[in-house]
Image: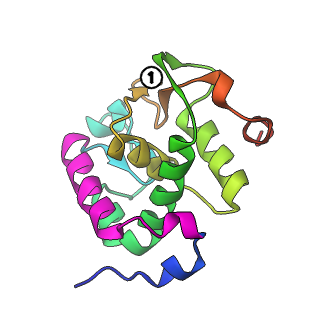
Amino acid sequence: MGFNDSWLQNLPEKFLCVDPESIKRQLESVLKDYPTLNPHGFVSASVAFGKAPQETDLKPSDFLKDADIYIPTIILCRQWLQDHQFRQTFNKAHSSYGYKHMVERRTNTYITNGAFIAAALTLDIPVKQCHPDSPNVYLPISEKSLTKEDLSAW
């Protein structure tokens, strides 16, 4: 079954060079390496080890099952990430949850926290979970590369 690419018609021209099937393959690889990543972010350690009730019924496989929803937003996040500079250390001033709001503001599109994290991982950008029970991660995005528009998302 081929990827439904009807959503491509609504993207700006600079995104049309992106191959959704390639992104899907990269996402499959990321999900093998990060089995607790789902569309909301990382499943907390306490949930993953059965110590607390599951807050969501979303699974990593939902990224692939609902690829027509998630792949376009991953592409938007990848473009946003590629427009920024990176540093050697994790920026703890913002988490993936804050960055996803920055992308939403710029694109006027709902982005899930997990889609933002998946975008970073498909670009081989390192992530660090904020704490073991957090769905959010820190990234090494340079604060200097964030625009006024990015920072006004909050």
Dominant secondary structure of the magenta stretch?
Answer: helix
Residue drawn 30% across the image and 66% down it: 64
Q: Secondary structure at mark 1?
A: loop
Residue drawn 35% across the image and 62% down it: 63
- Is residue 63 visible in the rendered image? The answer is yes
Magenta-tinted stretch: 13-34
Residue drawn 60% across the image and 69% down it: 12
Residue under label 1:
131
> Number of numbered discs present?
1
Q: Choose between 135 and 47: the one closer to the eye.
A: 135
Amino acid type shown at disc 1: His
Q: Is the residue 132 above or below the residue 22 in the image? A: above
Residue drawn 37% across the image and 83% down it: 4
- Is residue 55 visible in the rendered image? The answer is no
x%, y% of residue 38? 37, 51
**Residue 103 vs residue 140: left or right?**
right
The quadrant holding residue 95 is top right
